[in-house]
Amino acid sequence: MTKKSTDKQPTTEQRQRAQELHDILQRANYQYYVLDDPELPDAEYDRRLRELQDLEAEYPDLVTPDSPTQRVGAGPLTSFAEVRHEVPMLSLDNAFNDEELQEFDRRVRDRLNTSEPVEYACEPKLDGIAISLLYREGVLERAATRGDGTTGEDITQNVRTVGSVPLRLLGNGVPAVLEVRGEIYMPKDGFAALNKKAAEAGEKTFVNPRNAAAGSLRQLDSRITAQRPLQLCVYGVGQVEGATLPGKHTEMLLQLNRWGFRINSEMAAARDIDGCIEYYQQLGEKRDALPYDIDGIVFKVNDTALQRRLGFVARAPRWAMAYKFPAQEEMTELLDVEFQVGRTGAVTPVARLKPVFVGGVTVSNATLHNRDEIERLGVKVGDTVVIRRAGDVIPQVVSVVESKRPKNARDIEFPTHCPVCDSPVESTPGEAVARCSGGLICSAQRKQAIKHFASRKAMDIDGLGDKLVEQLVDEGLLHSVSGLYDLTLEQLAGLERMGQKSAQNLLDALERSKDTTLPKFLYALGIREVGEATARNLARHYGDLESLMQADEESLQEVEDVGPVVAHFVAEFFQQTHAQEEIEALRQAGVHWQPEETGGEEQPLSGQTWVLTGKLETLSRSEAKDYLQRLGAKVAGSVSAKTDSVVAGPGAGSKLNKARELDIPTLDEEAFIEMLRGRGIEI
């Protein structure tokens, strides 16, 4: 940053105003990026920033390195300078099972000559880029990559553009020299938006969020970095001069948080190694629901004095261990591609793979999504591909290893006719998905429609599994969803592996399913783009099915969260003769529900935000969520200052702690159920 010389000097009042704007904007950044609880509206923030920019433009002497206006603006670099780390940035040793983690704990206690349990700090291991931030007198001076641990690259210009990186630290007691270490990463939703934008522009997309973060930080033009949705999360310190930090790692992180840094809200302390293993299991279960990628958990001896006693080996500290999750990405061979037909007629290419162990299971199939995705990947049959599996998400092909492509690799040909019913495959302009035009004459679509209708969140027909649906359709006993209610004991008992008792149980389940709710019935119909929330909003807005069936697209767009696309699909569905006939057949079969309360009446929890955490024992999580939404509440996934109430079951962790910190009312399951009953919910 170079200041322009000028004879024009600011007044004392103008200097004071500039400093006041600094403080307001820095505080707003802290609330937005670190606390996730913004108080300053975006428009007001923009006005204050513009006022500061105008002041600095008129009086360049007011420009300081930590000014909120200085995040972006310098011209492109020709290369990155080298930086030598005063305190080496070491890597971590890895554990891949409980036994290896327990062996780490045994070594720690042996070196400390103790048989007592050792307390550990537990933190998710973010899948991003390790970074070092150097502050002098509280002002950011330099940012560098890890590099080889001794020497990294100076990427200060790029890191300054990351909103969660404080340019000046907050509060008191800041060391004269403070080197903070952390991870710069790209959240999942930001990654998805970045790739969508790139695909729409015909540009190359990124393979995963880590690659996207790395590519963003290594841009020579910081203006490009500034457009990328990057975040910083800090996990430790290096060089410190002029102050003494707390004696426990977890307390030190909380101090960094008070100085303006984002730390991981899942951070916790475990009393012993068994607590570490329990923490690992809990985070593993919620891993896929986190808004960012993690590839393991880092466990550190919490007492920093004990850390110093334990010391280091050549490349890693003796007091820390990364317990890695099973790999989510692996390479394998694409043997062939088959095409499946879904409930809405979507024709989806499925990769048949040489079996490979990934994400804790053996994978032999992966989705290729659609024709556009095949073209984007440039994938051919015979290629070596990288596949990714995250939890329950369907495995997908994410990239091709072109250097391993065999000479006999062949192009993937998309079908012009449905592979099931031979009806023409059609593509709608602007849509990536190709669809079978056969409708319910296509047995594949019929099967998927019936499976969806019977699913737990729809009509919840116990005992009607996927294999039984396929058998009923293949045997010619089932031609529509309404045909379910025409099935007889004789027909069902005659099927393979059924018998009289199983057949009667299914008929009983079909009878019970007739008593449902309008939201569940609408969801069960399988209207394109109408999920549970949209079905609930439609039912609440119109109150009865007849009013909804007569609604036009303009009227439908008045419903909460219904835009032009959803309105078109809903109106189109109810205009179709076969849909009207199917609904009438279902009602004639005895399917019924009580009228909904329309949106004109204020609901008991309208406008409130609730959070569910821990394991509920009487209710399932989805039942609890459904009851809250019926009462008008919004159910969020995280606790903030805007949360009205928290329901906490056994095993509640960081969300319950945060609720207590923010003094938010909490209910156990018993009190929650009493509250529901008091508002007319029968349980």
Image (spheres, rainbow, N blue to C red):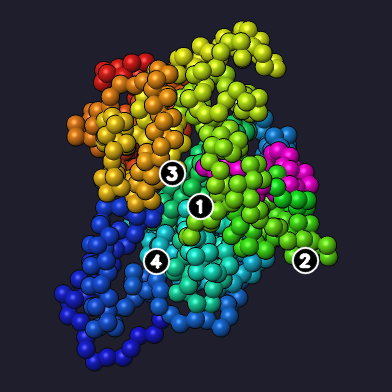
Q: Nearer the viewer, mark 4 or mark 2?
A: 2
Residue range of the region highlighted in magenta in the rendering: 339-364
Number of the label disc, if any, that sits on residue 41: none
- Asked which secondary structure carries label 1, the reply is helix
Q: CA distance from mark 4 to mark 2?
A: 43 Å
For disc 4, the marked residue is: 167
Q: Are marks 1 and 4 in contact (CB under 8 Å)?
A: no
**Label 2: which secondary element:** helix
Q: Looking at the picture, which amino acid does disc 2 mark?
A: Ser
- Which is closer to the viewer, label 1 or label 3? 3
Question: Is 500 placed above or below 526 here?
Answer: above
Front residue of 141 and 108: 141
x%, y% of residue 251? 46, 45
Tell me if 454 is positioned left or right of 565 in this view. right
* Residue 222 in magenta stretch: no
Q: Position of residue 7 (x, y in %)?
A: 24, 92
Q: Secondary structure at mark 3?
A: loop
The answer to which image quadrant residue 61 occupies is bottom left
Gap between marks 4 and 3, in whole Å? 44 Å
Q: Amino acid at mark 1?
A: Lys
What distance separates the C-alpha of mark 2 from that of mark 1? 29 Å
Q: Residues within 10 Å of mark 4 (few under 14, many from 20)?
A: many
Q: Can I make out residue 569 in this image?
A: yes
Q: Nearer the viewer, residue 3 or 314?
A: 3
Q: Which residue is mark 1?
A: 188
Q: What numbered label is drawn on residue 403?
A: 2
> How many residues crowd around disc 1 within 10 Å: few (fewer than 14), some, or many (20 or more)?
some
